[in-house]
Amino acid sequence: MATAVRNMPRRGVGHRRDQVGETEDFFTLDWLILGVTFVVMTMIFFLFTPYTHQLDEIKNVFLMTLPPLILFAAAYHVDFRRMSWKTHASTYLFGLYTLVILISYLLNPFKITTERVVWFQIGCSTFTVVFAWYMTSESKMRKVMMFYVLTALGSVLIGLFLRSGLDFTNDIYRFLASSPFGARNPEWVTLFYTLKEAKEMYSTILNADFYAAYLVMAIPISLSMFFVEEHLLFKVIAVVTFLLMNVCLALTNSNDSFLAMVILYGIYFAVGLIYIKEWGLTKKFILTFLTCGVLLVILTGTLMIPQLAAAWEFKKNAISGREILWGGAFWPWLYRDDFTKAHFDWTSVFFGTGPGGYRFYFPVFRGNNYFDNQINNVTTFGHSTYLDILCEFGAFGLLLFLAFHIRVLWDGFRQIRTSTNRAHQFYQLACFAGLSGVAVQNIFSPNNRWAVCGMIWWSLFGLSMGLYNLDNPGVDPEAPENRNRKGPMLAHWALMTLAALFAVRSIPQGFTYWRAAKLNGAGLQRMDKAERFRGSEKVALLEESRQLFASAIRYNPTFATAYYKMAHVLNQLGQTEEAIKAYEDLDKVFKDYSELRLNLGIMYSSKALSFTGAEKLAWMEKAWKEIQEAARQAIKPTAQRIAGHIGEELAKAYDEAGKQAEALAVRNKIKEYYWNVINYNPVLSEFQQDKKEWYPVAQQRLIDLANQTGNPREAEPVYKLMYEEDPDNQTVLGLLLAFYDSQKMAKEKNEFLKNAASLAITNLNVRKELAQSYLDLGDWDNFRRELRKIEAVDPKNLSALAGLYVYAAAKGTPEEAKSLKDKLREQGVDADKLTTGGLGDSASTSSLTLRKIEEEVVKLRATGAAAPAPPQPAPANAPTTAPPPAGNVQTLPAGSSGTVTGVVFPTTGSGEPAENH
């Protein structure tokens, strides 16, 4: 009956004859549905508001409140009896895909949060079914296409105005900022501040990448309109819109959209030239058009080279970020929240993690360096439509979506090949090319998960389906075999039920969402304003902000930002328990939101300070659980430092409770966090500064923890690292060498000094220490070799000369000893007065050190002791062995064994270690 009424012609004011002779009555439910759809799409497309923190919140409000009414009317009026698999397969597949979304919602948690994601998808799907089912005539089809082109024209005019009118918006901002109106209406000041600061091409979509995605879908429609329409005005509108959209696309600097356009244009002209015979233009005109288009692309590309290069460099650096984002969709699909990846979650494998599930589970699997890869703390989509669908709706969801997508493209391609209607061919070509281009873009982009792009994308499917149905209207519903089919009746009532639920649930949520968004925006303004005040004025503003956030949460219990900011405000007001409750409530509706785990860890540890004994320990254990997860999720230096600090406080609490094993385990664990501070090198300056601040703290804590855990040798790499970073710092070198000595790590000390000396050839202090290290090991040959290297660099170095003299007196030749004695005399040191005082009397070289030698030499030089005259040559008949010189030092023949200054000199060969050292 409804079908018969709909098909009855009405005569009246709205009666007219369209371009191909059809009679069109505008006073029908079909036209009413289309007209309301045009109005709703226009409102969603163009409107934005300064009364919410996000300027485009009102677009979501319209999408939540108006499409339910359209869908209910469309569901009530449609006749499913005319649909068959042959002519409406895409509709069947689309219905099955929607069914999987609903099943996924029912099977998964966080329903209060994910419900709005379901209604977002249903809202966008409304535009699919409206154009697929109600674009039923040539007149309707042409008016729908004109609507798309006029919408695009409006968007480019506004976009170019905002881009070129930055000075204009800046003037308005300065006026509002200093006017009474601006003081009373800070929202408008914020709006024009945003507009003047935005240097992108964004139009009313308010984001350059989103706007570029829209242009990819809309450009081919204006191009086809140019070829189809015969009226000159329509052609002018089409070509102007087409050219301006391409200019705007270039100004967006969106690389994925550029790639999509290359594919889109290739498909458009390749398929069009092969299958469309009548272009309505001369070959000369088409050639001229293509030539001008190529020249325009070359000219625009040349002018945009600097910006394109910068954009490409940024995108190239973001490849690692894409890997993190995509992994955050793939792994939850298999394991949900099991970051150990031990067992598959079969519910998520088949039906996904639920609508919007990506936002809940991405933090569990994202790379812990996400913040250095242009990834925000809060990430709701995986920057790949296909992976998002796989994550949220599982294998069944992705397969049905791809089947639907491919079927729409296949039906469109068949129509281009076989249709005898030139307009149908060209407009279907536009849909086919647009959907193909966006299909490529969707590999890298989440653009179609936002209000405007989602609305346009799903409506583009509807345009293609509606065009196909113009040539393939379906079966005769009045035929006997079609009258009593149960399938269409079940489908009709199922859709009616869904539309009713959509209206009953989404419309009220839309109104409360709007009120909550306004209250949240006002709360953020008070919170920002409070930063400019102190004392009671600041407290009053913070309290007002808290009340606004609380009201926002009452209207919208899933408003994550309001929870998060209210907890910040409560913390500033000193209301620790209330802040903890706000964070815990947030965890129930948006798991792992932003830095929730970090903040809970801090708040729990702060709460623990007000307790003692078992209660304190219980709160510290709660803090430890949260902060461990926070440190696992983000390797930010500050997060790692806080994790280490809370861990140390917990270890102290365990010590007080007599739980030594637990304290030891915690202290061993937090070494990991301090090493993360040291080893991770941030990319962004903000985190580089954090590392600079906490780096020395982490080094000292690791040294202390090595001692506290009974593993003092674990401090060695820390000391070595400290030296490598500042090899000229003698204090650090002294600490490291003292560490080796205290741990009796003579061989390790020697290896370190050999490496250090090879890297700092002229560093004499390191050479001295290396020589001493060889002496400690009893390696006299290398001891002498290192001192010779010092002498080569500094021939007057007293330590080297005195050390070599001691060596020569013990193991060298008389000639070598005499030469060194003369060199010391030239420096004002009498080697004969070099005594054993201070060198010790033990029978080990451990009592002999270059430092002691140097101290005595310097002391002798300072006293100004006169050096004796050089000895006279002996007579020819004198004995070959010279008499012992004055003093206590004996000169021994090479190879003999004895004592010099009370020290035993071993006779081991070169390279052989001395015993008992």
Image (cartoon, rainbow, N blue to C red):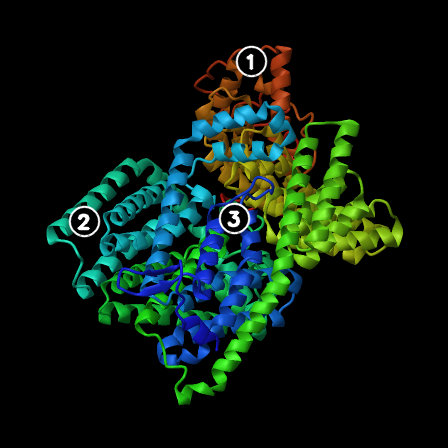
Q: Mark 3 against mark 1, which lies toward the viewer?
A: 3
Give the amino acid at mark 1.
Answer: Gly
> Residue at label 3?
375
**Towards the viewer: 210 or 579:** 210
> Is there a contact, CB below 8 Å, between mark 2 and mark 3?
no
Classed neighbour count for the residue bearing mark 3: other residues with Cα under 10 Å, few (<14), some (14–19), many (≥20): some
Which numbered marker is on residue 707? none
Between 262 and 156, the residue placed more toward the observer is 156
**Residue 59 placement (x, y as % from top left):** 53, 50
Is 503 on the left-hand or right-hand side of 443? right
The amino acid type of the residue labelled 2 equals Leu
Residue at left offset 69%, top offset 48%: 552
Q: Nearer the N terminus, badge 3 or badge 1?
A: 3
Which residue matches tag 1? 828
**Numbered disc 2: secondary structure:** helix
Residue 326 lies, in percent from the top left, at 48, 59
| Residue identified by numbered label 2 | 290
Left or right of residue 35, residue 632 in this image:
right
Label 3 SS: loop
Residue 26 position, x and y percent, is 41, 61
Q: Is residue 169 above or below residue 569?
A: above
Q: Nearer the viewer, mark 2 or mark 3?
A: 2
What is the x, y in percent for residue 622?
76, 55
Whole-angstrom CA distance, mark 2 to mark 3, is 40 Å
Cα separation between marks 1 and 2: 94 Å
